[in-house]
């Protein structure tokens, strides 16, 4: 069973190929804005490196958000097009779950955060470090309301913590336990865990949609103009 995994939710994109739960190859790239210029090229390079044809792929993992509006569209459209052409199932991956999966510590809740712009974060919190049981899930939390999710010390994953560090009240900073290796998502350890735990959700390509949570700035402006 050959699995393809794609993440374009952040500025750092990633493509991985797995044979069952064994990593074959992983490719990262940095791209601000659209990943469309690099995604197809790196996908073909990954296949060639492993001497695989496109039709060898049996299943697709796709990170569906929250994250960059443009980046998510590129990755999801790529995965849906491939799934349609090859009649393959897609398993959506939440980008906050993926970030939380980077945590290699135990004993405290995990707080995964992505910059939601406008002094706010997309946040999920996992009180028992069980990625299937968040008590805060995919919520937009303004910086002035962080105390409601940071009631105790938490292992904090995601670049948003560094991005807004100077805007976070000093009283809350002592509750934020973070490491550099938790800042960016990485599919290489997350996918085998999903496969091993048999917590796989397979969907038809038509069911896969981006998890935006909020409207983009342009969409909010159009909505405001329509109501005025």
Image (cartoon, rainbow, N blue to C red):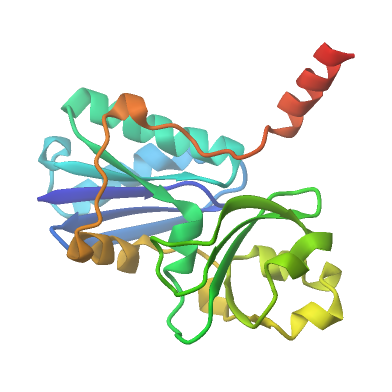
Answer left or right for 54 relative to 125.
Answer: left
Observer-nearest of 27 and 208: 208
Taking depth in this image into account, of 160 and 123 the one nearest to the observer is 123
Q: Is residue 50 left or right of residue 127?
A: left
Q: Is residue 64 above or below residue 14?
A: above
Q: In the displayed structure, would residue 191 be above or below residue 15?
A: below
Indicate the quadrant containing the C terminus: top left, top right, bottom left or bottom right.
top right
Where does the image place residue 3, in percent across and percent down from the top left?
Answer: 20, 50
Question: Residue 207's x, y, as percent?
Answer: 35, 28
Residue 97, position in %: x, y? 45, 59
Measured as percent of width and height from the top left, residue 15 is found at: 35, 52
Looking at the image, which residue is at 85% across and 74% down? 169
The quadrant where residue 25 appears: bottom left
12 to 112, vertically: above or below: above
Say if residue 23 shows up in the picture: no
- The residue at 9%/50% (across/down) is 1
The residue sitting at 25% across, 30% down in the picture is 83
206 vs 175, nearest the viewer: 175
């Amino acid at each position: 069973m050959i699995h393809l995994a794609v993440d374009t939710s952040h500025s750092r994109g990633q493509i991985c190929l797995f044979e069952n739960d064994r990593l074959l190859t992983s490719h990262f790239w940095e791209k601000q804005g659209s990943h469309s210029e690099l995604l197809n090229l790196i996908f073909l390079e990954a296949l060639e490196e492993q001497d695989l044809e496109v039709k060898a792929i049996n299943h697709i993992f796709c990170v569906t958000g929250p994250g960059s509006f443009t980046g998510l569209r590129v990755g999801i459209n790529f995965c849906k097009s491939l799934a349609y052409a090859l009649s393959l199932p897609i398993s959506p991956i939440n980008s906050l779950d993926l970030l939380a999966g980077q945590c290699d510590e135990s004993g405290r809740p995990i707080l995964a955060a992505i910059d939601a712009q406008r002094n706010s974060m997309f946040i999920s919190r996992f009180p028992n470090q069980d990625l299937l049981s968040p008590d805060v899930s995919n919520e937009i939390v303004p910086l002035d309301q962080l105390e409601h999710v940071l009631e105790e010390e938490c292992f904090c994953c995601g670049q948003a913590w560094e991005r807004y560090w100077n805007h976070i009240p000093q009283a809350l900073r002592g509750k934020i336990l973070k490491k550099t290796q938790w800042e960016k998502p990485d599919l290489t350890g997350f996918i085998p865990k999903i496969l091993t735990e048999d917590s796989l959700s397979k969907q038809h390509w038509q069911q896969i949609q981006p998890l935006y949570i909020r409207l983009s700035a342009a969409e909010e402006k159009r909505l405001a103009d329509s109501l005025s």
